[in-house]
């Protein structure tokens, strides 16, 4: 799996808020779900959990690590929270995506969607080490494919051991950009949505998965919701690992405001 992350404006370090949101969601699904049951799931004493949720007790990075694992959170999210608390290095957990950081100019180029698509395509059954085949499969020009291949080779994200065997050396990776401007971030955010619109028109409905909702939220919940998105991506990564593949898909999860807010008031 390839994750492109130019930077996130929503901070995901509020683990207490996340726990509170998970507890409320569980109670809505099952009104009989209790704090004690949630505490058992997290592996902590219910009185300790109550004090943590009420802000009466300090939450440590070690506690967040244990609770996060039990909730199936993305390892990256757990470790970012631990670093925020300045508790020192946290042991690496399995399944964590490797991180690669690029300067803004390089990131702007490698973030063009077909670079990661080519890398993922090498994992698909029937992959052919031929620019024309790749171009036809991804709907690109041969020139676009060749330029992308040269860039991937230069960045050591791809190896061509011989004419018949290409290796994606990036593996399960999160590509990050440093110093990315707001305009570039917006451009990169629009890119997957533009691709999705094209795919909706082109691909049969049976090969697409869509779900959506419009919901009123407290914007202070955004950090907790960002945790949920990270957890979903981690689950998707785990589900698709070590399996045979026949397609390359794009997964997009977006939370965007539909209301126009100015100085905290809806206009």
Image (cartoon, rainbow, N blue to C red):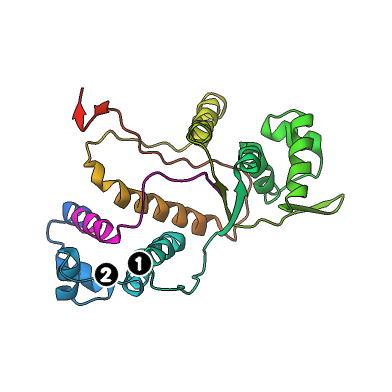
Q: Which mark is residue 142?
A: none
Q: Which residues are magenta?
A: 1-24
Seen in the image, is 247 located left or right of residue 6? Answer: right
* Residue 110 screen position, x and y as percent: 65, 41
* Residue 32 screen position, x and y as percent: 12, 61
Q: Within the image, what quadrant is residue 132 found in?
A: top right
* Residue 233 screen position, x and y as percent: 45, 52
Q: Circles 2 and 1: CB distance less than 8 Å?
A: yes
The answer to if 98 sits in the magenta stretch is: no
Which residue bears the numbered disc 1? 85
The answer to if 20 sits in the magenta stretch is: yes
Secondary structure under the numbered disc 2 in the rendered image: loop
Which residue bears the numbered disc 2? 59
Secondary structure under the numbered disc 1 in the rendered image: loop
Q: Residue at x 79, y 42 (%)?
A: 150
Where is 196 relative to 126, above or below?
above
Where is 37 relative to 185, above or below?
below
Mark positioned earlier in the residue sequence (2 or 1): 2
Q: What is the distance, in whole Å, between disc 2 and disc 1 at their CAs?
A: 9 Å
Q: Residue at x 48, y 53 (%)?
A: 236
């Amino acid at each position: 799996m390839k994750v492109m992350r130019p930077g996130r404006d929503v901070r995901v370090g509020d683990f207490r808020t996340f726990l509170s949101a998970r507890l409320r969601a569980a109670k809505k699904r099952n009104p009989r779900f209790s704090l004690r049951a949630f505490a058992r799931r997290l592996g902590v004493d219910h009185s300790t959990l109550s004090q943590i949720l009420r802000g009466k007790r300090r939450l440590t990075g070690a506690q967040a690590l244990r609770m996060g694992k039990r909730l199936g959170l993305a390892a990256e999210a757990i470790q970012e929270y631990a670093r925020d608390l300045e508790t020192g290095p946290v042991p690496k957990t399995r399944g964590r995506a490797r991180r690669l950081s690029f300067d803004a100019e390089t990131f702007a180029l490698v973030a063009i969607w077909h670079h990661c698509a080519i890398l993922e395509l090498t994992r698909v059954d029937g992959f052919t080490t031929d620019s024309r085949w790749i171009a036809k499969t991804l709907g690109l020009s041969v020139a676009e494919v060749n330029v992308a291949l040269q860039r991937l080779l230069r960045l050591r994200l791809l190896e061509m051991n011989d004419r018949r065997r290409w290796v994606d050396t990036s593996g399960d990776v999160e590509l990050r950009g440093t110093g990315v401007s707001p305009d570039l971030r917006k451009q990169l955010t629009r890119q997957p949505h533009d691709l999705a619109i094209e795919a909706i028109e082109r691909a049969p409905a049976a090969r697409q998965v869509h779900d959506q909702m419009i919901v009123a939220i407290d914007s202070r919940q955004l950090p907790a919701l960002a945790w949920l998105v990270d957890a979903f991506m981690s689950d998707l990564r785990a589900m698709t690992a070590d399996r045979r593949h026949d397609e390359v898909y794009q997964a997009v999860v977006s939370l965007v405001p539909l209301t126009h807010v100015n100085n905290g008031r809806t206009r």
